[in-house]
Image (tube, helix red, strand yellow):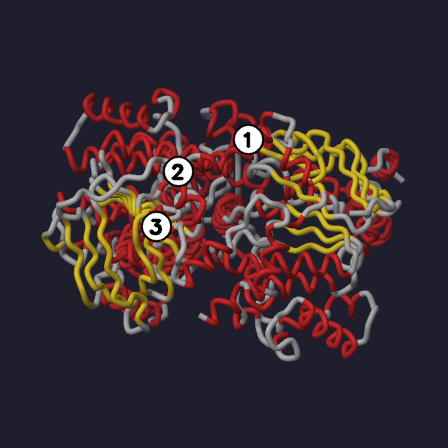
């Protein structure tokens, strides 16, 4: 791509410090970055690598509790570190724009989308209100939002997540900035929705020749978007290269390990010929108090020692199915069988032993562990509660469980959850489930809040535990890569119905149900031309929401 | 022009110039605006006004020094975790803690600190202060200072007990309502509304005139008046905690309500409750003092700050400040507690400058 033109953003030896434990700690340890006009740079790394901090730093902005301590940030010849706050503010919105991760949380729910869109041009007196509105509609059309003339006059809650993310990109474009910073714009979206946002962002950045910094932890996504990729680790740069070179020929060990993450695959197990399923969901309907039906005639079986992955986009009823199985939401019709005998529908009516059989691991380890309780009690309580262990026996059991999840017992025994990292918390969540000695565990999006390397560690751990303890998993996820690596059987759900189910190898080979096909083809791949090829194959109107609607 | 006036202006100007030279904007603005105000004050009020300003500044400085030293003292004594928290305390909070500490010492060791008994008549009525009596005598000739010290024990003790009772009632009901939900929650909520709809002072007066003004009745009446507020706060705070996944996990494990409340919910709603405790304590204290002032609180001859204000109120017409001393004691404690509570609220709300 012949884009090596003048330099737009030049960051040299940037150091940003954060305040914690009564002292300033380096978060960014001297990063250099050069961005030319019209160039898209991908910043990738695990959480805590400092991607977002650098993104904010590129605007000359340090978040609360952080400060830019050293280095220079030069935007189009202007030094931002020494500029006054007023000068920096004049740049933001007009020449540098920012697209946040969660559009739903970043739009003001009290104002119409188009009013928020036109705020920038009006503030900087670039356009009159009517002109700005015309321009907004034009941008909405370019971003292929449905009803571009009308959609801006809705409130944010009346628009879907993918559309809102595109509206936010349009808003960032409103003053035709030279640089846009995308901070994980698609992380919170489903794969099918993600693809249309990606296509829209790429289009518009190309049309206006805008430079962009694209922050993400998803390699496959960054491969589609960026011209160059910079890999960060703990506030330092690991390496930087053009996208093709980075993908085909990474130099550093860390980069290679990032690339290799998707390689884990557990051998597929098959159902025993004759046997009673451990958990059997039979024709279950469910709804939340008098609301519409969330689940509609859902049936599937889970056999002992096997992993059944339940996939589908958000709102498809995956988690509701899990709530029916655990008894939090009694089904309005149908029943849950455990080894052939029906489970009482409400968890309050289940016996201690029945409750013990079926444990949960949650998506957000932050909210799943009580922050005010020590690790020893979090894990020890189920053990004491179900098996009546006391004193030294209980301590031994907790140590054993900590060993099992590969954490050093003496080091973690007396700590509190907020002192642990995301991956460690998730391991504690697993240990808590194991402490009950269950036969069946519901894993609700257990890896989706984690970085890829950490997530892979968790998957390997779960797989190992399954082999050692003969556990059955119901694995709820929207990430098909996870399904590929750990599942034995797959259940695809859409709008509260089971669309398709079967063993993994069958599910990943055609022919598919059209919805499964859409899901599978929407998963980004490492090939930098994947999005282009897909768009050529399908046409721009046949991806994302539009395609889902056609089914 | 006395030496005092020359020194006064010289000091202020020196501070202003030094502050300006070393780029301390806020210090400079404070010092120099004080200088400008002093010019006017000096012309209007003469040397006396300047002396008053100097004394006020000196007192403020002394208070700040005491607060600073007291905070350092606490940090030095406290275990590491607590010390870390204490370091975040502003000087106002340290001052509040110092006040509370002083009152606690006075209340606990009252019989040893006070030179005379609380009901002991040692002099003529309204005798002025002398070397025997630090603050003079009250309307029956009892030592004002001794009664003040005993009052710390009686008034503060009563208010503390009543607040604790209100919290046990309110927080218990609130936690239970948040955990149980459904009709129980509704019932408790409406019941709290009913109590809150009765004007608090009238309710207290009613209770006290029916059952007689004894200490247990005061405590129970005050607890009932303040429990609904605590109930509302606790229910709201606990309502945010019960939706967490770890509560769901505990419920699925089959834990009973007692365990859920004690181990899972209460530790996570503690911070706002402690802050609220400080606030409510002030209100209860003022209510009890108000009741005493009306003659329905703690009965004579027991020393109590509210009734001490009332009994000596006549002296105010003679320009004597004696009745204001117990009132000042009430005000100081209220201010001190509020300083500490402000700091705690600030911390628990997670606000950063």
Residue assigned mark 3:
A506
What residue lies at 55% left-to-right and 34% top-to-bottom? A258
Question: Tag 2's secondary structure?
Answer: helix
Q: Are marks 2 and 3 in contact (CB under 8 Å)?
A: no
Count the marks: how many?
3
Q: Residue furthest left?
A: A341
Residue B3 is at least partly visible in this image: no
Foreground residue, B305 or A275? A275
Asked if A323 appears above or below A413 in the picture, the reply is below
Foreground residue, A412 or A482? A482
Foreground residue, A157 or B272? A157
Question: Tag 1's secondary structure?
Answer: helix
Residue assigned mark 2:
A426
Q: CA distance from mark 2 to mark 1?
A: 40 Å
Same chain check for tags 3 and 1? no
Q: Give the x, y percent position of residue A291.
A: 32, 73
Sequence-first tag of 2 and 3: 2
Q: Chain of mark 1?
A: B
Residue A210 is at least partly visible in this image: yes
Q: Residues within 10 Å of mark 1 (few under 14, many from 20)?
A: many
Q: Give the x, y percent position of residue B320.
A: 56, 52
Dividing the picture into quadrants, the one containing residue B92 is top right
Residue assigned mark 1:
B71
Q: Nearer the viewer, mark 2 or mark 3?
A: 3
Asked if B313 appears above or below A465 in the picture, the reply is below
Same chain check for tags 2 and 1? no
Q: Chain of mark 2?
A: A
Q: Residues within 10 Å of mark 3 (few under 14, many from 20)?
A: few
Q: Is residue B340 left or right of residue B221?
A: right
Q: Chain of mark 3?
A: A
Question: Tag 3's secondary structure?
Answer: helix
């Amino acid at each position: 791509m012949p884009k090596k033109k003048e330099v737009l953003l030049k960051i040299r030896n940037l150091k940003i410090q954060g305040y914690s434990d009564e002292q300033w700690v380096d978060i960014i340890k001297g990063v250099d970055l050069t961005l030319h006009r019209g160039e898209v740079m991908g910043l990738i790394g695990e959480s805590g690598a400092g991607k977002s901090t650098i993104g904010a730093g590129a605007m000359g902005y340090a978040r609360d509790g952080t400060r830019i301590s050293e280095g220079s940030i030069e935007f189009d010849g202007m030094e931002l570190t020494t500029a006054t706050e007023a000068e920096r503010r004049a740049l933001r919105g007009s020449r540098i724009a920012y697209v946040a991760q969660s559009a739903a949380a970043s739009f003001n729910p009290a104002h119409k989308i188009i009013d928020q869109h036109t705020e920038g041009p009006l503030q900087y007196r670039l356009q009159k209100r009517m002109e700005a509105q015309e321009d907004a509609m034009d941008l909405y059309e370019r971003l292929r939002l449905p009803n571009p003339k009308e959609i801006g006059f809705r409130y944010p809650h009346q628009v879907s997540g993918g559309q809102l993310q595109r509206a936010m990109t349009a808003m960032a474009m409103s003053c035709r900035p030279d640089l846009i910073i995308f901070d994980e714009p698609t992380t919170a979206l489903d794969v099918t929705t993600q693809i249309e946002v990606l296509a829209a962002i790429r289009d518009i950045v190309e049309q206006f020749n805008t430079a962009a910094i694209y922050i993400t932890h998803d390699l496959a996504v960054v491969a589609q978007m960026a011209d160059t990729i910079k890999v960060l680790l703990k506030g330092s740069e690991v390496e930087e290269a053009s996208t093709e070179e980075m993908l085909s020929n990474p130099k550093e060990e860390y980069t290679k390990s990032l690339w290799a993450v998707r390689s884990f695959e557990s051998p597929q197990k098959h159902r025993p010929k004759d046997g009673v399923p451990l958990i059997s969901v039979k024709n279950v309907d469910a709804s939340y108090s008098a609301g519409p039906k969330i689940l509609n005639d859902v049936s599937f079986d889970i056999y002992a020692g096997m992993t059944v992955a339940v996939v589908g986009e958000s709102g498809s009823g995956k988690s509701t199915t899990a709530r029916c199985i655990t008894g939090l939401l009694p089904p309005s019709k149908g029943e849950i069988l455990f080894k052939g005998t029906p489970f009482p529908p409400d968890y309050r009516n289940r016996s201690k032993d029945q409750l013990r059989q079926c444990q949960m691991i949650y998506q957000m380890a932050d909210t799943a562990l009580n922050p005010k309780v020590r690790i020893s009690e979090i894990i020890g309580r189920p053990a004491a509660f179900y098996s009546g262990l006391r004193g030294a026996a209980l301590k031994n059991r907790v140590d054993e469980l900590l060993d099992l999840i590969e954490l050093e017992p003496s080091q973690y025994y007396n700590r509190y959850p907020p002192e642990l990292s995301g991956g460690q918390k998730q391991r504690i969540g697993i240990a808590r489930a194991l402490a009950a000695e269950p036969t069946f565990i519901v894993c609700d999006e257990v890896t989706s809040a984690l970085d890829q390397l950490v997530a892979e560690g968790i998957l390997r751990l779960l797989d190992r535990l399954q082999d050692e303890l003969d556990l059955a998993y119901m694995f709820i996820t929207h990430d098909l890569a996870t399904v590929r690596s750990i599942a034995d059987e797959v259940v695809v759900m859409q709008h509260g119905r089971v669309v398709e189910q079967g063993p993994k190898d069958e599910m990943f080979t055609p022919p598919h149900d059209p919805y499964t096909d859409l899901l599978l083809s929407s998963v980004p791949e490492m090939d930098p031309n994947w999005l282009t090829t897909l768009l050529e194959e399908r046409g721009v109107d046949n991806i994302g929401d539009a395609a889902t609607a056609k089914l | 022009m006395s030496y005092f006036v020359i020194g006064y202006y010289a000091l202020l100007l020196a501070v202003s110039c030094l502050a300006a030279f070393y780029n301390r904007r806020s210090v400079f603005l404070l010092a120099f605006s004080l200088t400008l105000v002093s010019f006017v004050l000096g012309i209007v009020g003469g040397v006396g006004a300047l002396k008053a300003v100097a004394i006020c500044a000196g007192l403020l400085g002394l208070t700040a020094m005491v607060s600073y030293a007291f905070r350092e003292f606490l940090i030095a004594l406290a275990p590491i975790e607590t010390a870390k928290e204490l370091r975040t305390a502003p000087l106002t909070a340290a001052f509040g803690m110092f006040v509370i500490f002083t009152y606690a010492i006075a209340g606990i060791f009252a019989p040893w600190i006070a030179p005379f008994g609380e009901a002991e008549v040692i002099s003529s009525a309204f005798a002025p202060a002398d070397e025997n009596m630090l603050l003079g005598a009250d309307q029956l000739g009892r030592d004002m200072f001794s009664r003040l010290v005993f009052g710390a024990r009686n008034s503060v003790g009563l208010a503390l007990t009543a607040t604790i009772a209100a919290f046990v009632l309110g927080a218990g009901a609130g936690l239970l309502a948040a955990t149980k939900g459904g009709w129980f929650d509704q019932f408790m909520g409406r019941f709290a509304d009913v109590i809150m709809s009765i004007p608090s002072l009238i309710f207290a007066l009613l209770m006290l005139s029916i059952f007689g003004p004894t200490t247990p009745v005061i405590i129970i009446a005050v607890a009932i008046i303040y429990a609904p507020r605590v109930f509302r706060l606790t229910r709201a705070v606990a309502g945010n905690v019960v939706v967490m996944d770890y509560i769901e996990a505990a419920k699925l494990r089959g834990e009973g309500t007692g365990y859920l409340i004690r181990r899972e919910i209460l530790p996570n709603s503690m911070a706002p409750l402690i802050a609220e405790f400080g606030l409510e304590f002030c209100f209860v204290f003022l209510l009890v003092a108000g009741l005493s002032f009306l003659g329905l609180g703690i009965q004579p001859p027991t020393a109590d700050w509210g009734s001490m204000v009332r009994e000596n109120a006549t002296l105010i017409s003679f320009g004597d400040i004696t009745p204001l001393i117990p009132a000042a004691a009430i005000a100081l404690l209220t201010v001190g507690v509020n300083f500490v509570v402000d700091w705690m609220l600030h911390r628990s709300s997670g606000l950063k400058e």
